[in-house]
Amino acid sequence: MLRRTFAAAIAVAAATAMTPAAAAAPRAQTHLTLTVGAPGQTPATAVLRCGPTGGSHPRATAACAAIAQVDGDFDALNVGPDRPCTMEYAPLVVTANGLWQNRPVAHERVHPNRCALEVATGSVFAL
């Protein structure tokens, strides 16, 4: 009887050790579609993935780092607050839609010019 119990315990331990990694906690999904453009014009578009970093965004690593600092709150982005900008008015509309760490994102904002956009968002909308 002791041998059967021991053999059963070994079998359970071996089966547990062979459980696939898929049983682990699911990875948080970050997949965003970003756009930037002047009102009435076709915007530039890029896909950004974080964790692992990828997509078509030209500066994906820096963009993911900036968004991570504000935990996906695009309204909280303020990358270069001390950088001065001119008062020129050449508005740019930016959008971010998708998932940040499995949370839905639907962001749209108008920035008065390219400099103001870069001050607020850094590389996030550098498409």
Image (cartoon, helix red, strand yellow):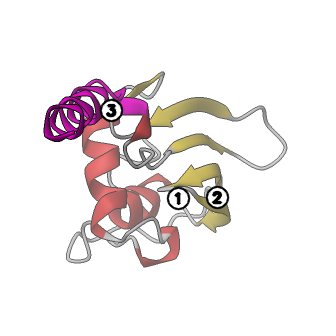
What's the CA distance linking mark 2 and mark 1?
5 Å
Q: Which residues are magenta?
A: 1-22
The residue shown at (64%, 58%) is 91
Q: CB atoms at circles 2 and 1 under 8 Å apart?
A: yes
Residue 58 x %, y %:
38, 25
Q: What amino acid type should be assigned to the residue bearing mark 2? A: Pro
- The correct choice, above or below, for 119 with respect to 62 in the image is below
The 10 Å Cα crowd at callout 1, few under 14, some 14 to 19, many 20 or more, is: some
Regarding mark 2 in the picture, which secondary structure is present there?
A: loop
**Which of the labelled discs sits on residue 52, or is there none?**
3
* Quadrant including the N terminus: top left
**Which of the labelled discs sits on residue 113, or is there none?**
1
The 10 Å Cα crowd at callout 3, few under 14, some 14 to 19, many 20 or more, is: few
Q: What amino acid type should be assigned to the residue bearing mark 1? A: Asn
Q: CB atoms at circles 1 and 3 under 8 Å apart?
A: no
**Which of the labelled discs sits on residue 91, or is there none?**
2
What's the CA distance linking mark 1 and mark 3?
31 Å
Residue 44 x %, y %:
63, 31
